[in-house]
Image (spheres, rainbow, N blue to C red):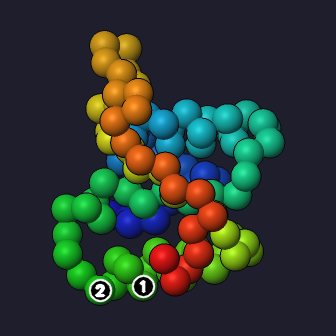
Amino acid sequence: MRNIIWPDKKGITPALVGNKAWNLIRLFKYGFRVPKFFVVTTTVFNSTSYYKEEEILENFDKLGSLHVAVRSSATCEDTENSSFAGQFESHLSVTKKN
């Protein structure tokens, strides 16, 4: 299972990335201008290893930016039957050292 998903990959599902990321990926694929991003999948949070941190930092470098926004989310968030507005955190101007 892939730990990091870039929006240009095929076979991505909401269960793997969550609905917010899924919708952002759809916007990207339909040609809307969105900032460069990658998604840390649900499989990462079900494991514990140094490798996952290293993999995230390697992909951070591929963004080509010193500062990024980090958004936590859940796979059940923003569905037809539920909304978790304000329940998760966003962090702006995150650096690789944070």
Q: In the image, is 96 to the left or to the right of 52?
A: right
Tag 1, which secondary structure? helix
Q: Residue furthest top?
A: 81
Residue 97 disc label: none
In this picture, residue 8 sits left or right of residue 47: right
Q: Which residue is mark 1?
A: 54
Amino acid marked by disc 2: Tyr
Q: Answer with the quarter of the image where residue 95 lies.
A: bottom right
- Residue 97, placed above or below residue 95: below
| 22 and 86: which is toward the camera | 86
What kind of residue is marked 1?
Answer: Glu
Provide residue 38's location: percent of width, then percent of height.
Answer: 56, 59
User: With 3 as the anchor, is 24 left or right in this view?
Assistant: right
Q: Is residue 39 above or below residue 28?
A: below
Q: Residue at x 34, y 36 (%)?
A: 87
Q: Which x, y percent locates residue 98?
A: 48, 77
Q: Residues within 10 Å of mark 1 (few under 14, many from 20)?
A: few
Pick the residue in front: 90 or 83: 90
- Residue 17 in sight in this render: no
Badge 2 marks a residue whose secondary structure is helix
Q: Does the CB distance between marks 2 and 1 fall below 8 Å?
A: yes
User: For residue 75, which quarter of the picture?
Assistant: top left
Residue at image location 55% in from the left, 50% down from the top: 10
Q: Residues within 10 Å of mark 2 (few under 14, many from 20)?
A: few
Q: Which residue is mark 2?
A: 50
Cα separation between marks 2 and 1 = 6 Å
Task: Examine the rendered structure and indicate whether residue 41 appears above or below residue 23.
Answer: below
- Tell me if 15 is positioned left or right of 64 in this view: left
The location of residue 37, given as percent across then percent down, is 62, 57
Q: Quadrant of residue 64?
A: bottom right
Q: Quadrant of the N terminus?
A: bottom left
